[in-house]
Structure formats: C-alpha cells, structure tokens
C-alpha cells in the first residue's frame, strides 16, 4: 500500500506520520464503517475513533442545499452539550457559523482556528461557544455529485490541536462516515454500480494513492484516458472526488479494502 494519502481537499499526506497501531486502528474503523447501518453502530465507531484522536465532542449530519444556502439541516449524531445545541438553534447560529458555511461551500477539511481567522464570527458566538469549551476543532464534509445535499462531521476537544496525523485520519475516515450516515438515513442505494473491468483497475490504483499519471504508466494508456475513466466512475457512483469514489466503491463491494 502507498505511504501517501490524499484528503478530501486533495492535499497529499504521508501515512508514515501514523504509527503501526494507529494505521491498524484506522483500517478497523474503515472496515466497521462499511457495514454500519444503525445509529448504535455509528456511535461505537465514533467512540473508537476517540482512541485515535483526542476529542471531547462530535456532531454529524446532513443538509439539503438550494440556491447557495441551506434548505434543511438535520443532525444524525451528536455528543455536543445539550445546552449549546439549544443556544445554537435558538440563536439561529447555523446562519452565521463560518464553520458550517465553509463546510457546505467547499467541503474540505478545515481546522476551526484557520476558518475563524479568515471569517471572524460575532463575538457573542465565540463567547457562548467558549462557555461550552468548543474552541478547538476540525470539520470535514462530503457532498453528492449534484451538489444538492452534503454532510458535515465535526469534532472538538480541549486538547485537539492542529496535527498532520489527525488530518490524515480524518481525510481517510470522513468519506466512509458519510456513507454510513447515508445508510442510517436510508438515503443510499445499496445496488452495485455497473463499473467496467478497466474502471475497477483504475479504482484499485486510486485506492493505493496513485495519480492519473502513475496509473497511465501502469495500465499503458494515456493520462487523458485515465481521467476519462475517473470521470465515468464519479458519474456512476454519484461522487465528486477520488477519495469519495474509492470509499463508495469499497462500500458497495466494487473493490476490496
């Protein structure tokens, strides 16, 4: 397996930053997410993720998007303080929260402090979130191909500092958690897509972290042909990037983990 992995936003990170035990645990989480169909199973995965990443709270959900805004916003799982959720909902903070806005705009991995520096939220928001010790955190999201729906996955913790190893883990697990939530909400089709043999070959090499140029050399085809296959794969799987395509292909059994 390649020692490089790409996050949802396309950044390449080295698996060498993770220890052997951490890689094994991460692969176990991926495997468990592939068969996750209930909220109880999802909760168990989140609890196990806490053995890899030190966080206090987690929240995840889906939003339907329309005309560049959020049409609906539904929480699937939350271990956030009830008090904060009441304040958040009562104050309509989802309309001004830069983390939420950034997630449903670009769907990349974001470290909260970076986002706050670029898009400073109102002081009241920062003070009230600070009262619940929600200052440090990461958020990742995935959208469907049409851009009509997307997920959000956030973790927060007193000791959750910016670390490459955390970004590697979230970059790998986030697409799988997205698929797990889809199954929980009965919003995914479990049928296998009609992926060709050559497309399976491309997916298998994408899983190994290979670039289009790498795959073109391995399969002895042009780079443009590889990109054509990848485009077809994303259309068939209703995905928007390579990481999500690999996650979906594994989830529906097109390729092996």
Image (cartoon, rainbow, N blue to C red):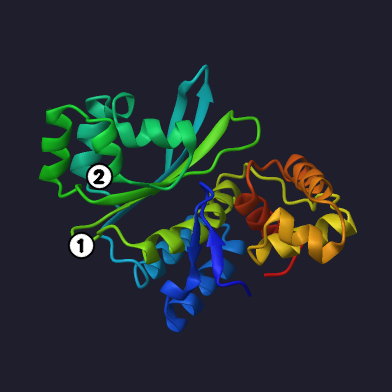
Q: Is residue 17 above or below residue 171?
A: below
Q: Give the numbered dot on residue 91.
A: none
Asked where in the image residue 86 lies, by quadrant, the reply is top left
Looking at the picture, tell me which residue is in the foreground, 224 or 187.
224
Is residue 253 visible in this depiction of the protein? no
Q: Residue at x 72, y 43 (%)?
A: 234
Confirm or deny contact between disc 2 and disc 1 (CB under 8 A). Answer: no
Describe the element under mark 2 as helix, strand or loop: helix
93 left or right of 38 in image: left
Please rate how many residues cluster around mark 2, counting C-alpha atoms within 10 Å: few if below 14, some from 14 to 19, many from 20.
Answer: some
Looking at the picture, tell me which residue is in the foreground, 68 or 7.
7
Residue 17: x and y, percent? 42, 72
Residue 218: x and y, percent? 80, 66
Looking at the picture, tell me which residue is in the foreground, 176 or 89.
176
Q: Is residue 252 above or below residue 127?
A: below
Residue where numbered disc 1 is placed: 159
Asked where in the image residue 43 lies, by quadrant, the reply is bottom left
Please rate how many residues cluster around mark 1, counting C-alpha atoms within 10 Å: few if below 14, some from 14 to 19, many from 20.
Answer: few
Residue where numbered disc 2 is placed: 113
Describe the element under mark 1 as helix, strand or loop: loop
Q: Earlier in the sequence, mark 2 or mark 1?
A: 2
Question: Where the C terminus falls, by quadrant?
Answer: bottom right
Is residue 110 visible in this depiction of the protein? yes
Question: Quick one: which residue is furthest to the top in this view?
Answer: 67
Q: State the CA–CA distance, disc 2 to disc 1.
A: 14 Å
């Amino acid at each position: 397996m390649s020692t490089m992995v790409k996050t949802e936003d396309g950044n390449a990170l080295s698996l060498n930053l993770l220890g052997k035990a951490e890689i094994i645990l991460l692969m176990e989480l991926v495997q468990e997410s592939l068969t996750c169909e209930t909220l109880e199973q999802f909760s168990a995965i989140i609890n196990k993720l806490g053995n890899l990443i030190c966080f206090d709270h987690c929240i995840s959900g889906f939003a339907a998007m329309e005309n560049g805004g959020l049409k609906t916003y539904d929480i699937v799982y939350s271990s956030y303080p009830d008090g904060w959720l009441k304040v958040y909902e009562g104050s309509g903070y989802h309309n001004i929260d830069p983390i939420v806005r950034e997630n449903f705009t670009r769907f990349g991995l974001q470290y909260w402090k970076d986002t706050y520096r670029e898009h400073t939220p109102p002081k009241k928001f920062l003070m009230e979130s600070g009262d619940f010790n929600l200052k440090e955190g990461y958020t990742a999201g995935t959208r469907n191909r049409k851009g009509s729906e997307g997920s959000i996955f956030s973790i927060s913790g007193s000791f959750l500092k910016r670390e490459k190893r955390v970004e590697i883990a979230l970059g790998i697990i986030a697409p799988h958690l997205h698929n797990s939530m889809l199954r929980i909400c009965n919003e995914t089709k479990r049928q296998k897509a009609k992926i060709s043999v050559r497309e399976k070959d491309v997916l298998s090499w994408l899983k190994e972290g290979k670039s289009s140029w790498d795959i073109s050399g391995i399969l002895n085809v042009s780079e443009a042909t590889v990109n054509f296959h990848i485009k077809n794969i994303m259309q068939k799987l209703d995905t928007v990037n390579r990481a999500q395509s690999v996650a979906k292909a594994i989830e529906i059994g097109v390729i092996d983990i």
